[in-house]
Amino acid sequence: MSEIKLERIDDNRLLLPQTGGMMVPGIIYANEKIHQLLKNDESTKQVANVAHLPGIVSYSLAMPDVHWGYGFPIGGVAAFDLEGGIVSPGGVGYDINCGCRLLATNLTLADIGDRLDNLTTALYQQIPSGVGSTGAVKLSGKDQKKVLEDGALWAVKAGFGTMADLETTEDEGVMTGADPEQISARALERGKQQLGTLGSGNHFLEIEVVEEIFDEKAARIFGLHKGQINIMIHSGSRGLGYQICDDYLALMVKHAQKTGIDLPDRQLACSYIDSQRGRNYLAAMACGANYAWANRQVLMHLTQAVLEKSLHLSPRELGMRLVYDVCHNIAKIETFNLQGKMKKLCVHRKGATRAFPAGHSAVPVKYQSVGQPVLIPGDMGSGSYVLVAQQKAMQETFGSACHGAGRVMSRTQAIKVSQGRSISRELANQGVIVMASSKGTLREEIPEAYKNVDDVVQVMHDSGIATKVAKLKPLACIKG
Amino acid sequence: MKKYKLLDHTADIRIEVSGKTRKDLFGNTVMAMFDLMIDMSGEDKIKGPDEKTLKVTGADLEDTLINFLREALYLFNGQRWLIRHCEPLELTGKSIIVRLKGEQYNRQKNILKTEIKAVTYHGLSINKSSKSWRAKVVFDV
């Protein structure tokens, strides 16, 4: 489909030369295997489209999990100068602060034994998931405002988890500058019912076992060891985040002519960072980000309660602790070294994880010597990776890495190829119990609909952006 | 006969809708969106339908379509109101007025197939061929 010529820079990178209205070239992290997959969709064109936006710095980047999104490609990273640069709701995505949270436990496979089935059922029944699910937490107007301003801190103060959880959450679970006045009544309404819910589509909760350790030192510091049972949660800001994105996208399209920015795709609608509308969006987006952090904090607490009850364990015996919580749909103001000068930039990560190395002030104190954990969930069958960010990420990718495996197959194709198959039985044969509120979701999310997560992660590892620490194998997965 | 078909898109749902007139096209597109979300087979009678009149504006025809679909989606995602019938009353290049018939969503009765989370501008087109109007829209799911 894509006719854009890419030039190979090295084994893991492709150059998308600057042509036409592009302000900068593009760089796609891909080995030859991933390069071949790029030819099947429009993501390369999307990397080029992003390069048209005013104030973009250095390169329009794509991580190896890149695939066709709308507006920005999924797996896209772009940094904009605060002066003359833009912020784009579509470059953040609808699900503001969609992200992953990895919970470690003291348990091993033997501790769960034959109780995995019951445990999965209990998690499925007690963690709200699926289309339009509503949560156990009902928010008053006043509480909701605090959620939007304080994020995960609100959740901890309300009794969901401990202060220690915040230490290992990106930005300590709160984005500053949130202003609830900047979000619509509709967004508030949608947010009221959904705190503490997983959602649908590719969101999940997974019980995983650490299968392999690649980096002993980093694994020890992250508190991971072979055979350990962990939980991975993937969720975001639910309807509230969607409504914020939608409201601002509509507003920016409406005023597109006034800003004079020539857009190759309306979904890229944006405002200058240094404009009232741009500032309002960032204040609204921060509300969405905080809601998502509170949501994952509540989900963690619900998960802990289910595990303790189902396995008859005390909190001390279970030993659940937060390894890390990363956000992978966001725009952030961060400082980078640009040709010897420290410069503040607005970094958009649309389906990309922040990856800050050892010594960076934003990395939790206890991970300072190794760097920030980067959490990469794979498909339902193949499991997840924990990587550790390296210095090279600061030089090449504005401190960013991939966020998952990335789809290769459309949902309709996935439904077609899974016709007549029992996906839950196939996964059960591989040793993965799957429960989903919709059979359609399972078929859309079949493992072969995704790139091989091993290939994607290998590109990050070989390019030195983020290196492998551990691989986790799924045992049970709950889907919306 | 179905008035829309699915086109390939890696992460989301992309459809092509047709209609004899522009008004038909707008009506068929909103009904296609609801058909993707909810299984309404075996249910042709609406019990005590509600009616709503909706007026939506946009910068041009394309933007009007997206804003119209957005409003319709909010009726479901925000208010749990299902559109079962859409009659476009008036359409200009920058606005539409429709009369909608629908009902409150009922978890027991209406089976949700897919959660459409948003209507996007990506790859949007509205074209007239010799006999009909066609639109392509991508939904975020």
Image (cartoon, coloured by chain):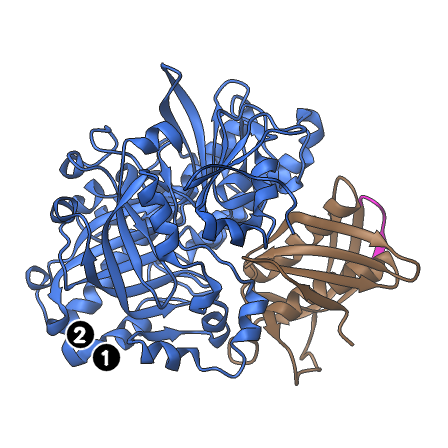
Chain colours: A blue, B brown
Q: Return the chain for callout 1.
A: A
A77 left or right, relative to A22: left
> Furthest-top residue in view?
A341
Please give the residue where the numbered disc 1 appears in the rendered image.
A118
Side of A96 relative to A151 (left or right):
right
In reply to whether residue B90 is colored magenta, the answer given is yes
Residues indicated by labels 1 and 2 sit on the same polypeptide chain: yes
Residue displayed at 35% across by 27% down: A395
Three-letter amino acid code at disc 1? Asn
Residue at image point 27% right, 35% down: A390
Q: Marks 1 and 2, Cα distance to the nearest angstrom? A: 8 Å
Instruction: Identify whether A167 is placed above or below A139.
Output: above
**Disc 1 vs disc 2: which is toward the camera?**
1
Q: Residues within 10 Å of mark 2 (few under 14, many from 20)?
A: some
Kind of residue sitting beneath label 2: Ser
Question: Which residue corresponds to mark 2?
Answer: A310
Q: Is residue B115 above or below residue A47?
A: below
Residue visible at 69% across and 73% down?
B49
Position in image of residue A344 (x %, y %): 40, 21
Give the quadrant of residue B139.
bottom right
Q: Quick one: SS at disc 1?
A: helix
Residue A372 bears which disc, if any? none
Badge 1: residue crowd in 10 Å (few <14, some 14–19, many ≥20)? few
Foreground residue among A170 and A48: A48
* N-terminal label among 1 and 2: 1
- The residue lying furthest to the right in this view is B130
Residue A153 rendering spot, x and y as whole percentages: 26, 43
| Residues in magenta, as a range | B89-94
Note whether residue A421 is visible: yes
Image mark count: 2
Q: Nearer the viewer, residue A13 or A74?
A: A13
